[in-house]
Image (spheres, rainbow, N blue to C red):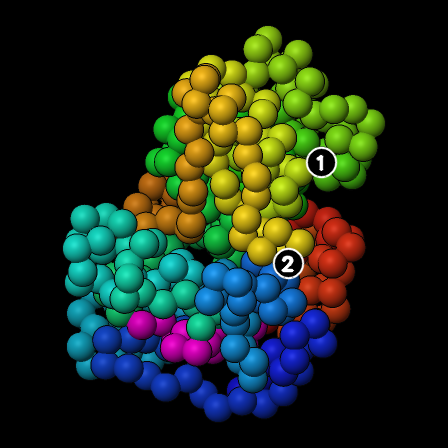
Amino acid sequence: MQAAVLREYGEPLDVTEVSEPDLEPHGVVVDVEACGICRSDWHAWQGHGEWADDQVPTDFVLGHEPAGEVVAVGERVESVVAGDRVAVPFNLGCGACGECLNGHGNTCLDGRALGFERAAPGAFAERVHVPHADYNAMPLPDGIAARDVAALGCRFMTAFHSLAHRADVAAGEWVAVHGCGGVGLSAVHVADALGARVVAVDVADGKLTRARDAGADAVVNARDADPVAEIEAITNGGAHVSLDALGRAETCRNSVSCLRQRGRHVQVGLTTDAEEGEVSLPTDAMTRWEVDFLGSRGMPPTRYDELLGLLEAGDLDPGSLVGREVSLSEVPDRLAAMAEYETDGVEVLTF
């Protein structure tokens, strides 16, 4: 089968023939219909994460936002059959440990990260293996396009989990979103669906236009104004919840600093080699105003039905954020475009 393989960090992916996925007794093989192209893939391609012992291996297939049809089923799988259309969360739980059984499969110590570690080759490929499929393969509602589910991918599930579960956003609260790439635009859309009022921040007018289309009540171009002061003015005192979707030291500090008393910051964006996982913060002010700093990674597979339910009901429309569909041969160039923030909305690999 054809796949896009990481050979060297920062060098174009090698689109080539690779072996078919091995089918484990507890797993399934999925014929990939679509897979989102995410900034986390760009981080992996660049070789980031060495400082956290989280560097993606070379000679490896990236891609972690697939949707498609099950074509092979392991002998121990009980709830998934060939022909099922499924979405696949990137944070693959083992399904049997305390974290998984208590609804926190995204923090499973025995889990696998699809498209990020040797034990879970990714979905920039014609087919992908899903381990522990009874726990990780999420059945799709009828009539939902694979392209839309791939756009849902890690960015929407991460945005939804960070806002609905970690920050517990309530209707009427102000939510600030720093960075309007894929996960940032998803956060704007999710916050709007949850009934919040949203301020979107970026340095590109085109992305801010997309943010307005996704539901932002106000936008701030950080090239033209101090985003912290602008957010405080727009929200009459600061955001209740603020999310850093980019992972730069500046956006992280701005996100914390734009909060009102007892505000909740959510860190979603991963840092680059400029920060190496470390960002200095105004801890005295955080203590004085009882500001919470929350980390958020993916979403527990057991709560995926909440997100798919919003999609089925029409409350979320991830397909509206898709700016481009690409072929497998185009994936290397689209990753490279992310280095200069040249992508527009969500980009999706389709077969």
- State whether residue 242 is above or below residue 344: above
Q: Is residue 323 left or right of residue 293?
A: right
Q: Earlier in the sequence, mark 1 or mark 2?
A: 1
Instruction: Classify the position of the C terminus by image quarter.
Output: bottom right
Mark linked to residue 69: none
Q: What residue occupies the far top of the structure in this picture?
A: 236
Structural crowding at the residue carrying mark 1, measured as other residues with C-alpha within 10 Å and reported as few (<14), some (14–19) or many (≥20): many
**Magenta stretch bounds:** 118-131
Q: Is residue 336 magenta?
A: no
Residue 125 lies, in percent from the top left, at: 54, 77
**Circle 2: residue type:** Asp
Residue 43 lies, in percent from the top left, at: 60, 61
In terms of depth relative to the viewer, which is nearer, 21 or 159? 159
The residue carrying mark 2 is: 273
Residue 188 lies, in percent from the top left, at: 57, 33
The residue carrying mark 1 is: 202
**Circle 1: residue type:** Asp
